[in-house]
Image: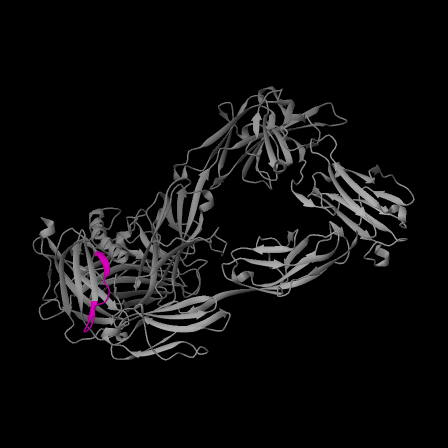
Amino acid sequence: MELFWILLFSSVCPLTLGQGVYARANAQIVHSGAACNVKDDNISERIYTIKEGDTLVLQCIVKGHPRPQIRWTKTAGSASDKFQETSIYNETLRIEGILRVQGGRYYCKADNGVGVADIKSIRVDVQYLDTPVLTVHQTISDVRGSYYQEKTVFLRCTVNSNPPARFIWKRGNMRIEQSKDNGVDIYEPLYTQGETKVLKLKNLRPKDFADYTCQVSVRNVCSIEDKSVTFRLTNATTPPMIRLSVNDSVVVDPGQDVFLTCEITAGFPPPKVTWSRYPGPLPLSAQVRGQTLILRAVTPTDAGFYNCTAVNNVGNPARKNVNLIVRSKCLYLLPNDKGTDAMGNLTFQITPDSNKDSETIQMGRDLKLSCHADATPQDKVNYTWYKNGAPVFNSDSLILLRSDPDMAPGTSSLEIVDMKFRDLATYSCVANFPGSRVPELRVDVNISQNSVSPPVLSVPPGGQVVSVREGGNAELVCLVVDGKPRPPILWSRVEKDLLMSAGKAVMETPDGRLRLKNVSRDMMGLYRCQTAPYNGLNIKRREAQIQLNVQYPPIVDPVFQDVRSRNHQMVTLRCMILRSNPPRLTDIRWFRNGDFIRMPMPDLKETPELKFKLEPANNGSYECRVSNSAGMSTCTFNVSAQPYNAEFYFDTPNPVRIQKGNNYSYNLQWTQKDPEATDRIIGYWVNVRKNKQSLLSKQIDLKGKEPEKGVLLSHTISDLRIPLSYEVRLAPITTYSTGDYISRIIQYSEPYTYPRPSDHVCGFEDDRICGFSQDRSDVFDWTRQNHLTQNPKRSANTGPETDRSGTKEGYYMYIEASRPRVQGDKARLLSPLFNVTSVRGPKGSGRVPYCVSFYYHMKGKHIGTLNVLLRVRSIASVDSVVWMKSGHQGPDWKKAFFDISPSGPFQIVFEGIRGPSFEGDIAIDDVSITIGKCKQGNTVATAVLIGGSHSLPLASWLTAGLASFLLLLHR
């Protein structure tokens, strides 16, 4: 059985050291969702087209060491530079049922902390087609001085779509063509939202009364079906008209049921009635029955403007509004100056003679009593004043103000002019709501020489500073110790822009005691207490300040730190005190693995510090516990001589090799993080598992060689069973300890098998272009084209007319030198990755020769440069120029061939460089790479060049080369 197969480590491939491999992240975006089309635009950005409702799948394939972290973000549109607040940390971005608003530019950011992060983007174009809306408008103009009357009808068809829709108008089943009917006009109006076409019926004729259909299409992109809407035009077609069953404003009491009816008085076809509300949606309890809106047991939150709209797609919609006002009042009680209760939403003010800056009641001076009810609506509140129970009427000494301009809106005042002894009495203010079930509200104010005096505000001794531990409760006290009547106390923060704990700027306390629960350090600061200007004398406010001091344990740094060191070396641990309240420390203690470390009492004014020599016996967890009177905080240090983890290298070229007996080997590579931080690493433990069951554990001996930072280590694991995958775990070993294991999955993939030389002629006839790929690090891309797909407006004096074989159907690759390209812009086309390790060179030679052959076309006075580079893949890729041509080379295709002898897996790179202007198109065709040196007069068989006749060789190349290349990128 498979679980009992034995895995052996190859003894012929010892551990080797490679060159430095820490490399910045590199990203590439590929798609695997329900795309309609993926193309490149003029600025070398990929455009992913998808139908609304389909599934978007984007995958970010990354390279780099250490393994980069992936982050997906997007902009709202192609012109915005602002990222969304949310991000997705995953290689694959998947959006089920994508919406049109989710279109835009998506970014994949790969970052591994080495150099600058790599960012790639792709533009997602969500395509859709809504059902069109058809509306009818008509005009009747009486032309004076003539004997006719013109009646014109406009049928307006509007649709939201992407891409822009195409419109077709039909009368009955017959398509309407403007050129064949003088009685119609078809045009696109200006300044309209969405795509709009208007069908104008001029001077209506009998045949114009018919069924009209507006059909819209987006040219079958993404398999989006056409949509249409039909309207029947008759001589009875009229726009809607409505009227409401109530007045423009309706005032009701809380708890009442409200019925609003919208009656249709005209309109054909019969209009449809809808109800809406501003602001906000309709209440959840709202019911719509036909044309009537029913609101059950209304509350003040149901108030607002209710809109009735009638629509039949003829003319403009008919609209009517009604303002619903729900009376409101508070239901809490406050004590008044007599010790009885008054409704809390009815307040009073006593204002002495303001012209004399008086703060007391004095005979011979004026006095104002004010009364205000917090109710909705204010203009429906009636106020009545009484003196010793008798109604008060306007007189020379008593003046009633229904709405006092010096007070808050809706405040009623009673002015006592030139106060006499006869004016000393009990005054009552009664507020009621005519036609309402809300009971009347009453407040009594006793005016006498002994009943009214200014308040005196006092903070109890020791209450100017209140200290409390974080998380506890506090009470700030500010009392009115004298004065009649005694007003409530208003609390606020002295510091600007700071709010009270309830999130309000001001809080009221009837007894002057501000109670704070679960106090946090951000609540610390100065608090202001003030007498309220209501329910007492309306004079200069009395105020005081109280400091709230929140005590909290020390804030330390670091809270946790991993400390690695060699054994027998000195280690220093420091615990920084960032903030503390109170600042004075009371204790500092050090612990190792929970046990107290006996040492001289440290200086409480200095930064806590512990120095010791690290030994195998004193590795462990160290804690520095720092205390003040409010509590204790801890710095924790994990001190160890244990080595850091290894870091797997995921970009190994072709790590799989086929072995006998349906087995394969895998070249495992990694680097060691900070190898000099701890004791010398002497080897590694490697553990291979299948289905969480260990198949083999073995120690790799470094044989005296020490790992270096950024230097690659390799080892070959042999006799793995095709096609199974395995979990490999790796841990470094020192003289004293073993590091933590890291884990990865190794998977079998078809190794690259070099195809036969006859298989390697690529004419780019297939849109997969034989496994070639665009280099994403260049400025722009090569383009696949033939004579039939050429832009008719292209530059005539540059570029080929046909492919190398002279057929109009044959394809080739070229660079477009027109705008927006500028001089020096580069485009690179990469061949598949070729593995040379499985092929032996000539006798006595360690390298295999290859012949590279291709055709090029460089016609134009602004031709730049065509370079061919050899890219050898090792730990890092190395490019070298092996062929180059510059300038105009004539109007014909020309052949080039040369030999290469790569030292490892390689790619051929075609680099086109734009010249000084637009007449500089460069093209290539019929690329061939064969084993062995080029023969004199090297030719390419015509049979494999003409339109599609070499599909078998292309498929062979694609299967071997592209699959290997993509798998390499994926790993």
Where is the C terminus found, in terms of image quarters?
Answer: bottom left
Residue 341's place in the image compared with 718, above or below, is above
Q: Where is residue 614 in the image (x, y as percent from the top left)?
A: 27, 77
Q: Position of residue 488 (x, y in %)?
A: 69, 52
Q: Residue furthest right?
A: 396
Q: Position of residue 390 (x, y in %)?
A: 84, 37
Residue 763's place in the image compared with 244, above or below, is below
Q: Which residue is drawn at 41% across and 43% down?
A: 98
Magenta stretch containing residue 735, yes or no?
Answer: yes
Horizontal arrangement in the rendering, residue 442 relative to residue 924 (left or right)? right
Horizontal arrangement in the rendering, residue 9 relative to residue 475 (left or right)? left
Q: Position of residue 159 (x, y in %)?
A: 52, 36
Q: Is residue 116 visible to the viewer in this orientation of the structure?
A: yes
Which span of residues is magenta-colored?
A: 732-745
Q: Which residue is drawn at 20% across and 63% down?
A: 730
Q: Which residue lies furthest to the left in this view?
A: 661
Q: Is residue 411 visible to the viewer in this orientation of the structure?
A: no
Which quarter of the picture shows residue 412?
Answer: top right
Q: Nearer the viewer, residue 12 or 632?
A: 632
Magenta stretch containing residue 816, yes or no?
Answer: no
Q: Nearer the viewer, residue 491 or 649?
A: 491
